[in-house]
Amino acid sequence: MIDHCPTMRTTPASTLASPFRLRNKTVKNRFVVPAMGTGFATADGFVTPALLDYYEARARGGAGIVIVETTTVEFPRGIHASNKLVADTDLAIPGLAELASVIKRHGALAILQLNHAGRMGKTRINGIQPVAPSAIAAPGGQIPKALTQNEIALIVQRFGAAARRAEMAGFDGSEVHAAHGYLLATFASLCSNKREDKYGGTIEGRSLFLREVLQNMRHSTSDEFLLWCRINGREYGNDDALTLSEGQELAKLVAPYIDAISVSVRGYGSQSLVNYPDAPGALLPVAEAIKQVVKVPVIAVGRLSPEVANRAISECRADFIALGRQTIADPDTPNLILSGRTDDVRPCIACFYCADWGAKLDRPIGCQVNAAVGKERIYELIPTAHPRHVVVIGAGPAGLEAARLLGLRGHRVILLEKEPHIGGQLAQAAIPPHKDRLKPLIRYFSAQLQKANVEIRTSVTVDRQYVLDLKPDIILYAGGAKQIVPNIPGVDSHHVTTPIDVLYERVQPGKTAAIIGGGLTGCEVAEHLDQQGVKVTIIHPHDGLAKEAGSSERTRAIAHLSARPVTVLLRTRCVSISPEGAVVREADGTERLIKAETVVLACGVEPDNALYQDLLETGIEAHMIGDCWRPGLIATAVADGARWGHML
Ligand SMILES: Cc1cc2nc3c(=O)[nH]c(=O)nc-3n(C[C@H](O)[C@H](O)[C@H](O)COP(=O)(O)O)c2cc1C
Ligand code: SF4
């Protein structure tokens, strides 16, 4: 084992603020923005103003290293989704030069991640058959073409040429993407590499392609250019998955060619979300295991909270801390942590919205909690020249974000809420099991509203006169949504209730419950009730649960639910509610009774804006924001709040 902290016994332990030397370059601190595809490039993969704004904001936020997202060495065969950057042509250099420059302007090292999609490529996106070590499809993917040795040699050269372009553009270095499910990772893994030539077999053979790539990149660039790779320290969920000891071997094999190593993981099947952990520091043991066998500095990743990150650095378990989703949610996170202002960090709620919209739905990324992603310049906070008195009605995500921004910009803001606490649908959504991750966001808003001098009045019954007495210049109505009540016999029985009443424990559930509706809310209420010992049946008319959710969020919800003894009836409608439970009709027309002491209506929500119509008659300027005019995700509510928060 290698002694990585020889100085620890004689000098104070390193901290997140400690500089680090990489070749002849000094990294100002230990924070890294890891590569994250944004979908902000042009269709041909060139740099756009949105991309420049996005990366400049991340660099301004204080990270020592900013790694620019997956950039292909072979367009279009090497992209896995639309609007991904390219570095396979000199035409890309001017745009990449601008990108490197906006990052370096803020004292961060600019690193370009180079990648080939391999079997993650999709004909529907690039019109070409994907390639791989062997003709084995990725889960849910197409059968790829197995690369010949000549084709491998050409791709090796492409990586070298792309690295040369990155250096010409002014990047400080390149990271080779050999992690997750892309081309180089599939060579390293026995799950996808069944070759019998020199590129297959033992981990030595399976890593040969990557080592040739790194060697070629080294020869194609100057001695000053930094070079490293991102690997899977291990894989999960498949009998042939890369083991941790193979991951360590892989790291040792590539170590002679690199200045650092970034350690991620990859999962299959039910483990497919393992590289996006919910629990802080869940992947740290893997990075630590790699660090134990190599001398090159290690970049760790995986929902690293400030506490976990600080300990990891001071205990020499990793050398750099990559903050992925957290720097999408709040690009200023490194600066805020380093200056001790952790209360001001807008927390990522680990919701998968960014990953689902980006990678899976093939759209530019967005963030549930940060409406300014890719619009950083447009959403710059500009103090108002004409302060006005704004009354915001409803302290859900739309009202909270609008009030926060309006207050910060110098308006006088009163925020009214009928519940005894702020949060609206956020507060409700934070109650089910596994949803604690939403609570920091409510705490964040609470702290920020104070700093923005917003007057908050909770437990208020708002009517037209109440608002008139406040004499506002403008009303923002964020009254939220209400449960849809289906038109079926028995729906107004005493044992019928709503998710909100269950979650806030305003009703005492019986020993058995039927949940009408298997959307995300229905699934979460089922988990909540099951945890309380209630025997639960979900009745859902469609052929799959939580279909309105993004694919990763749905995968997670179903995984949580499958771990519990909850009965799920798909393609089944509730046709009436009797004192004994819910009468259902199955797909073949059979009707039967599902016995339930409690029936929960989780059939979706509809706008709740009766008061708004009343307020319009006051003649005061009024606008609806959030769920009260278009029920949706936290993201749509926050985006509405941000729009009005900047517009007034
Ligand atoms: C929207 C999005 C895009 C990503 N794109 C890339 C990518 O281009 N290259 C890569 O190596 N990892 C990519 N990742 C993975 C992240 O770099 C990181 O490993 C992952 O988000 C876990 O870290 P976190 O918990 O700090 O978010 C992406 C993640 C997200 C959320
Ligand atoms: S979309 Fe969700 S997971 Fe992604 S950065 Fe924003 S809060 Fe985090």
Image (tube, rainbow, N blue to C red):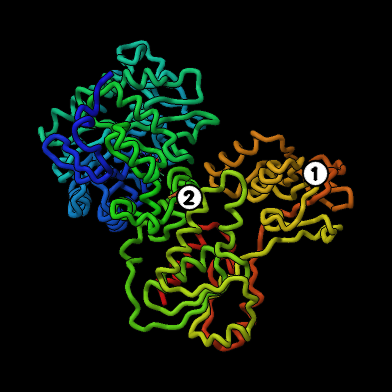
Q: CA distance from mark 1 to mark 2?
A: 32 Å
Q: Residue 397 versus residue 489: which sits nearer the camera?
A: 397
Q: Quadrant of the N terminus?
A: top left
What residue is drawn where x is 55% and y is 57%? 633
Residue 87: image location, x then y, percent: 24, 41
- Tell me which corner region of the image, top left, top right, bottom left or bottom right, holds residue 367: bottom left
Residue 292: image location, x then y, percent: 30, 23
Q: Residue 309 versus residue 135: which sits nearer the camera?
A: 309
Q: Quadrant of ligand 1?
A: top left
Q: Which residue is mark 1?
A: 512
Amino acid type at image mark 1 = Thr
- In this rendering, is residue 354 above or below 470? above
Amino acid type at image mark 2 = Ile
- N-terminal of the pair, mark 1 or mark 2, is 2
Q: Quadrant of the C terminus?
A: bottom left
| Residue 282 falls left or right of residue 505 | left
Q: Which residue is mark 2?
A: 349
Whether residue 73 is visible to the viewer of this picture, yes or no, is: no
Q: Residue 125 versus residue 24: which sits nearer the camera?
A: 24
What residue is drawn where x is 16% and y is 29%? 218
| Residue 592 falls left or right of residue 475 | right
Whether residue 2 is visible to the viewer of this picture, yes or no, is: yes
Using a 10 Å C-alpha cutoff, classify the residue at mark 2 as few (fewer than 14 neighbours), some (14 to 19) or many (20 or more).
many
Number of the label disc, if any, that sits on residue 54: none
Q: Is mark 2 within 8 Å of ligand 2?
A: yes
| Residue 117 falls left or right of residue 22 | right
Using a 10 Å C-alpha cutoff, classify the residue at mark 1 as few (fewer than 14 neighbours), some (14 to 19) or many (20 or more).
some
Q: Secondary structure at mark 2?
A: loop
What residue is drawn where x is 26% and y is 35%? 175
Q: Secondary structure at mark 1?
A: strand
| Residue that lies at the very extreme toward the right in this rendered image | 579
